[in-house]
Amino acid sequence: MKYETLQIATQHGVCVIWLNRPEVRNAFNEIMIAELTRAFKAADADKSVRAVVLAGHGPAFCAGADLNWMKKMAGYSLRENQADAMALAAMMNTIYMMQKPTIARVHGPAFAGGMGLVAACDIAVAAQEAEFCLSEVKLGLTAATISPYVVAAMGEHHARRYFLTAERFSAAEAFRIGLVHELALMEELDTKVNALLGQLLSASPAAIAASKELIRRVAHGAIDQQMIADTAARIAATRASADGKEGVRSFLEKRKPSWTEIKAQVTKELKAKKPKASKH
């Protein structure tokens, strides 16, 4: 499968999706939005893929919306704008709803929609030089399509500040407010990502998918009898599953579970060599 705005490298159970518009700081346009949706769906459906990393070529992770795309949208009718916004919203939700674990590798500016990409991923790792900004209000807009993910990541209290002021903030501040999970020196960014991949690849793929669904279910629900019954049913189902039985059995037999047999031998540096484009 060929991509115009992305570069895909899949090996050892890890799919790395590179934003590949460095000349415009990996800014979104309608083509990139469609290709990101397609690429994440393909990775989720690929049985050989155990984890996905989202990264960016060039000086920025993602600078938000492409200026030429914004000029085009300015001439759209309300109906055309709704269709265009739905494509962006669907792309963000595709990332968020992935069954497989996702890591955002943030090495530079992540502005506007770029922050949405970071928040939609399960885990975010940022270089200390990275910058963040929700710049929409300065353009007379709102961060509507990315808001469910960004607010969930940083919380309502912090969202009130950064959605309204549109000020830039550092990777250290992103870490403090919970948007980013890990910070690293730029030269150690890939080492940090690879360490997390090692943890993810040692876990049951089925249990990871079930855990992601579980988190979405309980995150904002009331702890009532329905929630109690639902969580009890979920653990019962995982205990009876093939991976659940294998995990307990391997623990009792003091051996590694079967899924670790294909644990990735992840390369130490994702950017050490230019990755070859995927043929799928």
Image: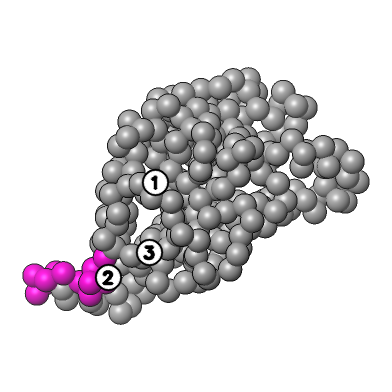
**CA gap, disc 3 and disc 2:** 11 Å
**SS for dot 3:** strand
Q: Are marks 2 and 1 in contact (CB under 8 Å)?
A: no
- For marks 3 and 2, give the one nearer the viewer: 3
Q: Give residue 262's mark.
A: 2
Q: Residue at x 75, y 31 (%)?
A: 141
Residue type marked 1: Lys
**CA gap, disc 3 and disc 1:** 14 Å
Q: Quadrant of residue 201?
A: bottom left
Residue type marked 2: Ile
Which residue in the protein does label 3 denote? 11
Which residue in the protein does label 1 denote? 271
- First-in-chain label (3 vs 1): 3
- Tell me: residue 197, above or below residue 149: below
Give the magenta-colored segment's residue range. 251-263
Judging depth in this view, the residue of 139 and 186 nearest the camera is: 186
Residue 263 is situated, as x and y percent measured from the top left of the image, at: 26, 65
Residue 279 is situated, as x and y percent measured from the top left of the image, at: 52, 69
Residue type marked 3: Gln
Q: Give residue 150's mark.
A: none
How many C-alpha atoms fall within 10 Å of the one at disc 3: few (<14), some, or many (≥20)? some
